[in-house]
Amino acid sequence: MDNRVPIWVWHYFSLDHARAASSFSRKCGELEALAPSSGDEDTAPIGTRSDHRSYATSSVLASGAFIEACINEFILTASRDDLAHVEGAEARTGLELNERQQITAAGRDLSKESKTLERYQKVLQLLGREQFDRGARPFSEAALLMRLRNELVHYKPQWRPEHSDERRSTDQHNLVVGLMERKFTPNPFYADSMNPYFPEKCLGHGCTSWAWNSALKFADCFFSRAGTTWMYENARYTLQP
């Protein structure tokens, strides 16, 4: 007879994504210190560029995953009496019972919303809180980040001009224009190359720092409006990109 008591675990992955996004971003910065200066011979160890691309891509993906995990965790935690009112638990939503009941009742409709940022908007609306201005920060930055994340996840190759102003090229689209307008420091491994802006010049420490900071500011603003904090708060000092 098996007398073992089963243990159930409710895991919050948003903190894992936060740590991954910031850690991979720092790795990008460390490798960029090995990049050659303009006109100098490239003496970086073999594999440095490919490692750098891996870190940059992983950081952006984790930043996007962090945004999605936060709202899903918030919605599902609100529906659980055994989580929402645990004394001292980091995961408490901080919501009143009637507010949690509203979110629980709308749970199915919220889960059907395919656009992650709209899920945030609907939750704020249900709670009677001020919604985000879609045309202003931090929403606009989070929206651009999610578009970049989706471009990487659902990537479809296409011909890009070797070297030109991409704003005028056939490859011009709102994502690339938006990223170029942020003017973050380009990937130094390709800064002087003839390669197009995306992905070579775009995916670097400047981009990953922007992506993670945008994700964190968006989450901070949401939880502030909701009147609570989330798991990453106690680890904030470790989450520098």
Image (cartoon, rainbow, N blue to C red):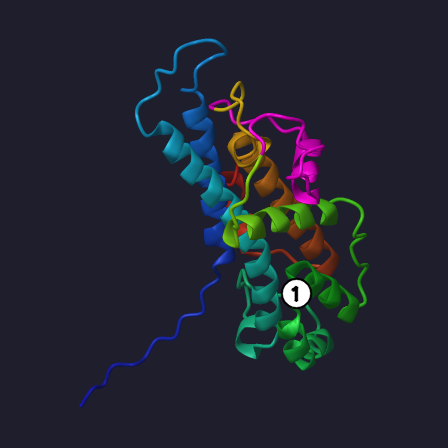
Which residue shows up at 31% across the image and 22% down it? 45
Which residue shows up at 66% across the image and 32% down it? 166
Residue indicated by mark 1:
94
On the rendered structure, is 180 left or right of 47? Answer: right
In the rendered image, residue 168 lying in the magenta stretch gets the answer yes
On the rendered structure, is 29 left or right of 183? Answer: left
Of residue 126 and residue 142, the one placed in the foreground of this image is: 142
Residue 239 in picture, x, y percent from top left? 51, 41
Which residue shows up at 55% across the image and 40% down it? 159
As drawn, the residue found furthest toward the bottom would be: 1
In the rendered image, residue 207 lying in the magenta stretch gets the answer no
Question: The N terminus lies in which quarter of the figure?
Answer: bottom left
Residue 227 in picture, x, y percent from top left? 71, 59
Of residue 23 and residue 170, the one placed in the foreground of this image is: 170
Of residue 138 and residue 52, the one placed in the foreground of this image is: 52
Residue 158 in picture, x, y percent from top left? 54, 44
Q: What stretch is highlighted in magenta?
A: 161-189
Q: Identify the element where label 1 is drawn.
A: loop
| Amino acid identity at mark 1 | Gly
Q: Can residue 94 be seen in this view?
A: yes
Which residue shows up at 39% across the image and 29% down it? 49
Residue 81 drawn above or below residue 24: below
As drawn, the residue found furthest toward the top would be: 39
Residue 145 drawn above or below residue 196: below
Residue 73 drawn above or below residue 205: below
Of residue 93 and residue 105, the one placed in the foreground of this image is: 105
Residue 73 in picture, x, y percent from top left? 56, 65
Residue 95 drawn above or below residue 29: below
Q: Can residue 92 be seen in this view?
A: no
Badge 1: few (under 14), some or many (20 or more) residues near its Cα, within 10 Å? some
Q: Residue 131: which quarter of the image?
A: bottom right
Secondary structure mostly taken by the magenta-highlighted segment of the chain: loop
